[in-house]
């Protein structure tokens, strides 16, 4: 009395009981539709039924000590489902109108779905193992459970938590008042540590979801069974059936005939059910007498909610009036006539636009694979290769694409529309005029996609040569040490050789190396910095471009120059817009009698000022600029020897010998040693071929001219 005796965790249900329960559950279709309408419960849906003989005024009485939502409380409801009640007394749960007098209905407060199936486990503050550990570590009760004490009602009574069954998801508790044990669900066990308000919100949320699901299932079962004969069935017509089969397949193999017949049978049943449900919901929302009838059967009637205007309706520009007296086929014909792409000819011409685009888009506007080039290549070869790919695709679009679209439109629509319209104002109101504008819009979108894809592929090509954040742009070149890191040689020490030495070795305004100083005499290996010694570092990378370090007009130059490299790369991207800017849409040649009104329409797809385009072009330029730091450093290494290009060797020797007073032997030796030192520095300044990630610099011509 007051408590259930101690017993182990509930054993699994027998096979026979499971089969009976499964047979009594609503059909899979009912459960699937119910889950679609409401949030899916956490566990398997179990449906039971209340006691048909219970009085309608109050809920079934519970024995003292039982717990609401516990297995002992739900045992009566779980033994009989809605299906079992329909077999025993069909009118008791889902009676067909009118109600048979004398029959008692299930009370509205009886629940046939377990509350725990709709528990939101994300609201659980701690796992079950935590609660068990806290309970075992405390000698006092750590939780409370609802206890039914007869006329006194429910009360939260302290209890000890002794165990947990993870398979059944049940907690074993021991009442602190009587010492009896019981298995309870989580929503019937409130721990002292958890927030009580949060726990109540959790229980209320689960109750709300269960009530909504039960109400929907009651309406569904009533609509599915009790309304047969009250709402007429509307079977699929033969015309609709043939149209559906035509969309599935033009012909079915003989081995699929039985499968097709089974599928058609299910489709007819689902169609009839959908029509019956549509009529049911219409009566449910518009017929007050029908709503009162459902209320008398303890079937909840949904509260009408104000409907907000959908975004689709907000964008409606016009409406199409359909007279009520028209039949379904007549209404469909009027809709097909009034709408746009429901016209078969227009739809065929619209689909042909995609087919034509696939046919003429043979590639991108650039060569992103460089399969036809032997790398590294010259900048001019790269430019010619890219422009060949660009002009090939652009010419195909300019000549064939527009013409093919015009021919396809004329072929698809010549039987339904006249292309010899003479009145411009009437033509502007026609669907054909709208379709021409739609065609040009689609073509602009297709061309825009081609340009964006080409820019993305072009950027991806140069990203393969991009330097990483930790990569040096001058690798594998070793820059001079000390003051020569900037490419400017360190000034020598004081000298007395005057005008007979080169400017860098004691010429006017410069200081030279005196005899006996560290810089006097032939250059020694120890005098060369790391950059001046032969470099053994090779990157192993296959660059894209090759440039030559050469001399002209007394200067050391790169051919082509670095600005020309940047310009050649960017010209390809600018060519995307130059070559596609003169591609026109359709319309001006389809209507010969309206030629004065219809001018060629350029396809305004993209411009270089578009933010997405500008970002990609800037990314390519940044990659090129950073990769050109290394070649620029190579050029600077040899610029200090440009004085050799402006001196005539014979005139220099003649000036040296005819000087008054004549130079001494030490002065001549120092001059020759300085020249010999510069020659060795030029030879060892860098490798003859310096390979950076994007550019390879060939130094043969510059070295030969300087030496």
Image (spheres, rainbow, N blue to C red):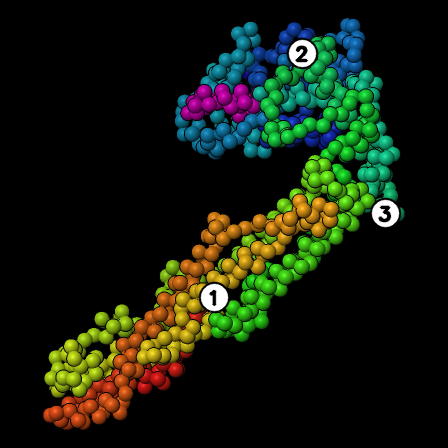
Q: Residues within 10 Å of mark 1 (few under 14, many from 20)?
A: some
Give coordinates of residue 460: x percent, y percent: 51, 59
Residue 221 has which mark? none
From where the camera sits, is residue 549 visible? yes
Q: Residues within 10 Å of mark 2 (few under 14, many from 20)?
A: many
Q: Looking at this view, is 363 or 115 the one in front?
A: 363
Residue 251 has which mark? 3
CA gap between label 3 and label 1 equals 58 Å
Which is closer to the viewer, label 3 or label 1? 1
Please identify the quadrant where the N terminus is shown. top right
Give coordinates of residue 217: x percent, y percent: 69, 22
Q: Is residue 75 left or right of residue 236?
A: left
Residue at 77%, 45% in the rendered image: 420
Secondary structure of the residue carrying tag 2 is loop
- Residue range highlighted in magenta: 182-207
Which is closer to the viewer, label 1 or label 2? 1
Query: Marks 1 and 3: in contact by CB < 8 Å?
Result: no
CA gap between label 1 and label 2 equals 85 Å
Q: Is residue 287 left or right of residue 269?
A: left
Please identify the quadrant where the C terminus is shown. bottom left
Give coordinates of residue 155: x percent, y percent: 50, 13
Secondary structure of the residue carrying tag 3 is loop
Q: Is residue 11 left or right of residue 458?
A: right
Query: Marks 2 and 1: in contact by CB < 8 Å?
Result: no
Residue at 49%, 20% in the rendered image: 200
Residue at 69%, 31% in the rendered image: 32
Q: Looking at this view, is 533 or 150 the one in front?
A: 533
First reached walking from the N terminus: tag 3 or tag 2: 2
Q: Give the residue at mark 2.
A: 107
Occupied quadrant, residue 258: top right
CA gap between label 3 and label 2 equals 55 Å
From where the camera sits, is residue 89 visible? no
């Amino acid at each position: 009395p007051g408590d259930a005796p101690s017993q182990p965790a509930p054993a699994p249900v027998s096979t026979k009981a499971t089969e009976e329960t499964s047979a009594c559950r609503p059909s899979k279709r009912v459960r699937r539709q119910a889950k679609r309408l409401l949030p899916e419960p956490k566990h398997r849906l179990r449906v039971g039924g209340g006691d048909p003989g219970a009085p309608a005024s109050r809920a079934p009485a519970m024995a003292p000590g039982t717990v609401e939502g516990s297995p002992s409380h739900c045992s009566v409801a779980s033994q009989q489902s809605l299906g079992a009640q329909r077999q025993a007394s069909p009118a008791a749960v889902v009676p067909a109108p009118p109600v048979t007098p004398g029959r008692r209905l299930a009370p509205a407060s009886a629940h046939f779905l377990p509350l725990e199936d709709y528990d939101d486990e994300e609201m659980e503050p701690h796992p079950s193992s935590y609660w068990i550990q806290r309970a075992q570590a405390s000698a006092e009760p750590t939780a409370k459970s609802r206890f039914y004490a007869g006329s006194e009602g429910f009360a939260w009574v302290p209890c000890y938590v002794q165990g947990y069954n993870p398979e059944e998801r049940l907690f074993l508790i021991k009442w602190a008042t009587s010492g009896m044990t019981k298995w309870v669900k989580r929503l019937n066990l409130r721990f002292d540590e958890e927030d009580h308000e949060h726990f109540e919100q959790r229980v209320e949320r689960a109750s709300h979801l269960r009530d909504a699901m039960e109400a929907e299932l009651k309406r569904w079962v009533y609509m599915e069974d009790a309304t047969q004969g009250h709402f007429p069935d509307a079977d699929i017509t033969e015309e609709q059936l043939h149209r559906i089969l035509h969309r599935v397949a033009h012909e079915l193999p003989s081995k699929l005939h039985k499968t097709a017949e089974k599928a058609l049978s299910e489709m007819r049943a689902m169609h009839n059910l959908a029509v019956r449900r549509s009529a049911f919901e219409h009566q449910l929302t518009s017929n007050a007498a029908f709503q009162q009838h459902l209320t008398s059967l303890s079937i909840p009637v949904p509260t009408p909610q104000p409907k907000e205007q959908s975004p689709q309706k907000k964008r409606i520009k016009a409406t199409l009036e359909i007279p009520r007296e028209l039949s379904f086929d007549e209404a469909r014909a009027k809709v097909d006539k009034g709408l746009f792409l429901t016209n078969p000819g227009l739809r065929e011409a619209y689909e042909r636009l995609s087919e034509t685009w696939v046919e003429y888009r043979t590639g991108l506007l650039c060569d992103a694979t460089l399969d036809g080039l032997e790398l590294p290549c010259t900048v001019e070869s790269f430019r010619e290769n890219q422009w060949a790919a660009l002009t090939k695709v652009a010419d195909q679009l300019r000549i064939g694409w527009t013409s093919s679209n015009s021919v396809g439109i004329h072929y698809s629509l010549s039987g339904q529309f006249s292309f010899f319209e003479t009145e411009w104002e009437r033509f502007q109101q026609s669907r054909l005029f709208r379709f021409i504008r739609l065609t040009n819009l689609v073509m602009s979108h297709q061309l825009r996609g081609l340009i964006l894809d080409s820019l993305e592929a072009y950027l991806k090509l140069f990203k393969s040569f991009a330097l990483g954040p930790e990569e040096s742009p001058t690798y594998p070149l070793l820059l001079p040490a000390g003051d020569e890191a900037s490419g400017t040689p360190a000034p020598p020490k004081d000298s007395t050789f005057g005008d007979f030495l080169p400017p860098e070795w004691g010429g006017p305004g410069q200081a030279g190396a005196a005899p006996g100083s560290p810089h006097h005499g032939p250059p020694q290996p120890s005098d060369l910095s790391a950059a001046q010694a032969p470099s053994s570092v090779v990157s192993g990378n296959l660059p894209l471009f090759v440039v030559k370090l050469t001399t002209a007009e007394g200067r050391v130059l790169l051919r082509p120059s670095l600005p020309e490299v940047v310009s050649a790369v960017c010209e390809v991207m600018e060519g995307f817009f130059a070559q596609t800017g003169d591609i026109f849409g359709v319309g001006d040649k389809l209507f010969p009698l309206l030629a004065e009104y219809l001018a060629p329409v350029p396809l305004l797809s993209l411009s270089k000022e578009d933010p997405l385009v500008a970002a990609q072009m800037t990314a390519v330029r940044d990659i090129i600029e950073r990769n050109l730091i290394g070649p620029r450093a190579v050029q600077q290494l040899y610029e200090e020897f440009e004085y050799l290009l402006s001196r005539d060797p014979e005139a220099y020797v003649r000036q040296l010998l005819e000087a008054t007073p004549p130079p001494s032997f030490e002065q001549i030796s120092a001059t020759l040693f300085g020249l010999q030192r510069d020659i060795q520095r030029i030879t060892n300044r860098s490798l003859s071929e310096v390979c950076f990630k994007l550019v390879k610099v060939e130094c043969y011509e510059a070295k030969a001219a300087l030496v």
